[in-house]
Structure formats: structure tokens, C-alpha cells
Image (spheres, helix red, strand yellow):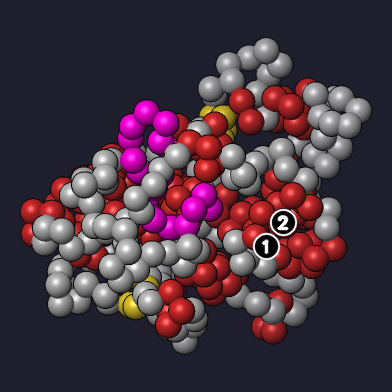
Amino acid sequence: MVIQVPVRFVLIFSHYMILGISQAQLQVGFYGNACPDAESIITSVVRDASLSNSNTAAVLLRLHFHDCFVQGCDGSILIDQSGAERHAFGHQGVGGFEVIEKAKARLEGVCPGVVSCADIVALAARDAIVLANGPGYQVPTGRRDGLVSNVSMADNMPDVKDSIQQLKAKFFDKGLSEKDLVVLNAAHTIGTTACFFMTQRLYNFFPGGGSDPAINPNFLPELKSQCPQNGDINVRIPIDRGSGQKFDNQILQNIRNGFAVLASDARLYEDEGTKSVVDSYFGVLAPIFGPVFETDFVNSMVRMGQIGVITGFEGEIRRVCTAFN
């Protein structure tokens, strides 16, 4: 089964897809001979999951990000054992494991020992974006699954409380640019967050206490009503005010206007470099001469998907994604 991709997005990234492939030894269509139906099987599983849970797209996109940002895109976040990475504090709220495992089981029934869990995560994120009305693109594959998963390795994940300097440093450390930082954070265009992550920003912001002054005064009462002080910290609210179910650049407009929900998103407008990236999508001439958000997002996703990959004879191809062979 194949997702119908809007024509304007088909192969939006075709002329960029060679970027870094030779270095990472990844290639588009890696499973073309060994498991020709691999991508369509993953697409089918992701689509079915999305039909039963509208938050699936955001969950799978976040899973890919969290996997790549610890020790590379190697599926280490999927291991489910004592002391494994997935149990780290920085991975709170990360989900989608059952979708990846279902896709893996389907693939093992057709092409045993061929498709890596790391590739399933990357391909599932792509399919999830398309299902949220985002751009379709080709994913270079050939990742192998890692042999290490340790909770301590997730200590340096980007955090909602990070300053813009900390966020930039964490992205630079992975070989990603200021534009990548802005565009990948814009993945918050879909999905929700828990009030747990809002408490400090609304009621005990540092420095000075009180609420984060970056929050638009017209937006503050709305946020406080959704996440009242001493209320249920597990209540979930859309991260992208006004467009939480659709992939678009509305979240960047929200950031410009003080309507960012997460503190880390708001920080993007405090730094001249990241601020200029945000503004570049909204200038008077942007629709004609400016950058295309969807193209930049795809570019950044493919680049992120190559962080620390292992290929060739390194690592392994797991039989199940939750355990080493």
C-alpha cells in the first residue's frame, strides 16, 4: 500500500538526497533487491496506526529525533531492558515503540534478518510526516542496529529548559546548523506536550520567578487555564497553537508573535542567528524569493537521519527491535 503524496511535495528533495550518502554509506532504495516491499510495508503499518491514533505522526517523528540525538540513528532507544536508553529522563513521553515493533514483525515474516530497526524508525517518521499533510521525501537507508543502549547516554538531550546557547551547542555537536535547529524544532507543528513541561515556564520562570516574559500577554491566560498551578501535570495541550494536527509553518509564526507553547521554541527568537532563520519564511518577498519551509525541513530531516549511523558489517540487524540478538 502506498500513501498518496501531494503532487507539490513529490520528490521535493530529489536534488538534495545525495547529500552525505557517500560518507555515511547510505543509499535511497537500499532494500530494493533484498526486500523490495520493505518501505510499503512500513507505510501500511504507520497508516493503520495513524487511523487509530491521531497523535501517531508526532510520536513517530519525535522517536526518530530522540534516537538520533543520543548516540546516532542506530535504534538504541528501542531496546527495552533494565538500564537501557529508553528509560532516560530525557526520553520522557517518547512513544511509538509498538508501531516500530509491529512493522518489524511484518518485515521479518517477509524478509527475515534484512531490514534494520534503525531504518524502520527513519522511514516511519517520513511516512508519519506525509500523513500529517507534510512533504514526502526519499530516505537514504542501510543503517545497522547498534549494540549498546545505556540510560546515561541520554543525559545531554536537548531540553525544553535549555537556553538558546545550550540548544545551539547541542545541535552543533551533532553537525547541525542554526537552520537545522529552527527547522527541526518546527516539527512541533504537530503533537502535544504535557503540563509537566509548562509548570516552570508559567509559574516559576528563571530568573525572577513568575511567568516567562516571552509569552504574549494575550496568550498567558489561555496557557494558565489549560495548565493551572497545582493542576494535573499529565494534561496534554497542542504545541502548535491553532494548527496542532497539520504539518505547516504556523509554529514559526507563533514563535514570532509570542505564542510559542514550549520555552525552547520561544528561545529561538532570542538569538539573532535563529531569529533571522525564523523571519526568513515570512518576509514580504518570501513567497517568491524566500526559502521554502518544506524543502528546508526535508533537508534537515535527511541530515539528522545520518547522525552517527553504522553501516556495512558494523552492529547487527535485530530480530526484534526491543532486544539485542
Q: Is residue 45 visible?
A: no
The residue at the point 70 percent across, 52 percent down is 167
Q: Residue furthest top?
A: 230
The residue at the point 69 percent across, 48 percent down is 265
The residue at the point 72 percent across, 56 percent down is 169
Up-down relation of residue 209 to residue 48 (above or below): above
* SS for callout 2: helix
Q: Residue furthest right?
A: 208
Residue under label 1, please give it.
172
Verify CB contact (< 8 Å) between mark 1 and mark 2: yes
Would you say residue 27 sits in the magenta stretch? no
Apparent side of residue 145 relative to residue 214 in the rendered image (left or right): left
Q: Is residue 113 visible?
A: yes
Q: Which residues are magenta?
A: 69-86
Q: Quadrant of the N terminus?
A: bottom left
Which disc, if any, is residue 169? 2
In the rendering, at what x and y percent does residue 139 appear?
37, 70
Apparent side of residue 298 relative to residue 139 in the rendered image (left or right): right
Q: CA distance from mark 1 to mark 2?
A: 5 Å
Which disc, if any, is residue 314? none
In the rendering, at what x and y percent does residue 320 appear?
21, 45
Q: Residue furthest bottom?
A: 15
